[in-house]
Amino acid sequence: MDGDTAFANRRRPALFRREYRFALSLSSCFALIALTAGFVSWLDQSESSFLLLWLSNGVLLAYLLVVPRWRWSAYLTVGFLANLTASSVFSGTWKLNLLMAALNVFEVAFSASLLRRRSTCLPNFTHGAYLRRYTWIALLVAPAAAGAIFTPFAVFWLHGKAGACFLSWTLGDGLGTAVTTPACVAIFRTGLRSVRKGGLVWIYPALLVIVTVCGFGQSRVPMLFLAYPLMVLVLLRLDLAWAALCALFFSATGSYFTIHGQGPLLIAKSFAPEAPIVLLQFYTVSGMFLLYCISIVLVRQKETERRLVKTVTLHKLVTENSRDAILIVDVHGHASYASPAIERMTGWKAEEAGSLGFDKMVHPNDRPGLESVIAGLQPGGEGATIEHRVRTKSGEYIWVEGSLRPFVSPATGVASGTLAILRDITERKRTEQEREFQSSLISAIHNVSLDAILVVNGDGKVVSYNRRFAEVWKIPMSEIPARLLGKRFNFSDNQLLSQCIGQTKHPEAFLKRVEELYADRNANDHSHIELRDGRTLERYSTTLRSEGGEYLGRVWFFRDITERQRAEEELHNAYHALETLAVTDPLTRLANRRRLDQSLASEWRRCMRERQGLSLLLIDVDLFKTFNDTYGHLSGDSCLKQIAEAIQEVVTRPADLVARFGGEEFAIVLPNTSNQGSVRVAELICAALRRRKLPHISNPTGYVTISVGCATLVPRSGQHAHSLIQMADDALYAAKRSGRDRVCNASAPGEAGVMARVS
């Protein structure tokens, strides 16, 4: 009982952690983000620290890169609260703190969504391609996007310069993410398990701590140059997680001392007040770049070593288990290498076979031919195959088939020997004369084959015929000639042909094709035969020839493929039904967005070739949200269906395409249609909908109305179909702004004004 109690006590913390793992993870996320954000905010109270590394975004991004995507909302919420809490403690108005916290969360979410588009895409900072994507997205694009949003607010509230504010945000977030995210990801995934490698490895992180503190704590003795070698040693002796953690410590310590007026970097203050911080940032980032590069080299080296070990293991596996003997023969006829199979084949050990030349291994009668073949081999040319006899250790000779290929020395490029693969063919030689085996094999194939087989010789006599033939053609056994059931057949093919021809749906065509095949001794046939009972047979016929090319006869194969054809037809119908569903909107039965994109791209290319105008109408239901709120979503669906019917009443040309663009928006592609024609179609659609008088109390007119944007282009090289969509979209929003229930037309490119109201 005491043992059970102790075991239960040991398991209780593990069960607790497992049950509350998500809550603990969120708590640790909040603590880390608040700590890093608070630390930087505390340091950021100095006027010279406007370019400090912002570390909290890197921590939150690390969490999002390793946790499931469906939990991102929880971590983003925790990150927002932690940033807001930390920034509110130290400085700033609540509006500015709220804005900065929201922008930090936006920046991290933007980076994570691009870096991890699929849930299975996990971070790998030792992979060159991923590292490039990470640098481009997380360190440049995302900080720049958030900085661009932050800059106007900073200019308005803080009265700062736009360029300085944008640069401060972009560099601070980008460099902070570069330092923090790889370190946190490595720590989250490995748990710093490298501590098990031994106590001596701790000397390198300890030395780095000493060098960092001493280097930044004074400016008389230059010591910072020692940081890079120590980081590299930590990377080599521990791993990237510890090295990145050391770089993070280096950055935080350097920031503290530099901001408080200590350290060797203050010498750069004579150039600009913020120069020491900028120099510290690039010093830290260059260290991280060095660690990344070395990590990639180490990973590739390990991969090369693994591939080399795999290659050696595979080579050993092949050579030791191959039934063929592999030899490398030098120009003097001695084997410099022999695989273990040589001992199983001849009894000679590999070392003994290597010391024996052609004069002792090859049969005297076969030696001249073998030497002649080897002499005729050309480096880089085709190899040769020769059969010869080899002496075994017992003095007997066995037949082998040798595949010979010359090879050249990689160093000199001169032919240095021959690669020989020997296969024992003694048994094959002994059985070449045993033709009975072939007869038994043909009989077995006839008995077990699922195909109906008929073999006819050159004189038109049946020489082989299996029972499956009778089953496929439904020939009663009572009508089969008695001599057909014996081992030897000697009757005309016309006797079976007369039994089969009456069952075909097209007897004349069947007979004509059979006569053509018998007349042409080089013809093959692969076709289908339809029978009167509804079945379909697959027929394949080919000629039989001897090794010398002499015509021996013809073989016929028949297979009942009725069920297979039915299955293929059902599959084909199902595929077409699925293909139709894939391009159809399920609510309105119009084309969906996928079909719209395909049609627009196709018509764009066609109109470009023909230099014809291509028009696009974008339709939006006015005040549709209030319609749904008033009448319910089911009524909203019914409304969309009636609008689709109204559009289809007007758009009737086969080449035109009506599609649901998304939500309450519709799109109409009008090929070979002028701008005036497209506007006329839009007006007719509006009129058709007004005639339906669909009630909408929230609409000033009392009925459901639509706004239409029209655009027409003659496609040219260098343009894209998106430009037509953009023009129509701009026209649609112009119609919305003008009061709805109208048609607005996009002006031609280059004309004054952007939109022309039509109705």
Image: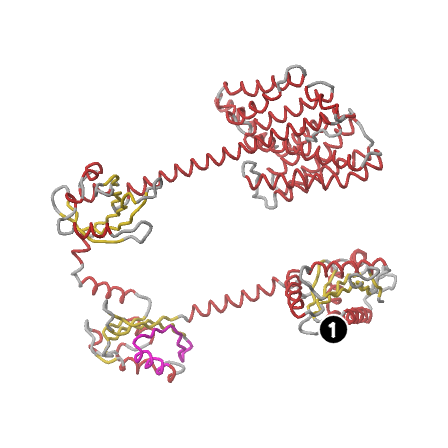
In the image, 480 versus 94, the foreground residue is 94
Q: Position of residue 185 (x, y in %)?
A: 59, 33
Q: Specify the amino acid type for callout 1.
A: Glu
The C terminus lies in quadrant? bottom right
Q: Position of residue 29 (x, y in %)?
A: 66, 31
Q: Looking at the image, which residue is at 69% across and 30% down?
A: 53
Q: Position of residue 646 (x, y in %)?
A: 75, 70
Range of residues picked out in magenta: 510-534
* Residue farthest toward the left in the current orientation of the protein: 395
* Residue farthest toward the bottom in the current orientation of the protein: 508
Q: Label 1, secondary structure: give it.
A: helix
* Residue farthest toward the right in the current orientation of the protein: 700
Residue 524 falls within the magenta-colored stretch: yes
Residue 513 falls within the magenta-colored stretch: yes
- For this view, does 254 lie left or right of residue 546? right
**Which residue matches tag 1?**
649
In the image, 673 versus 565, the foreground residue is 673
Which quadrant of the figure has residue 431?
A: bottom left
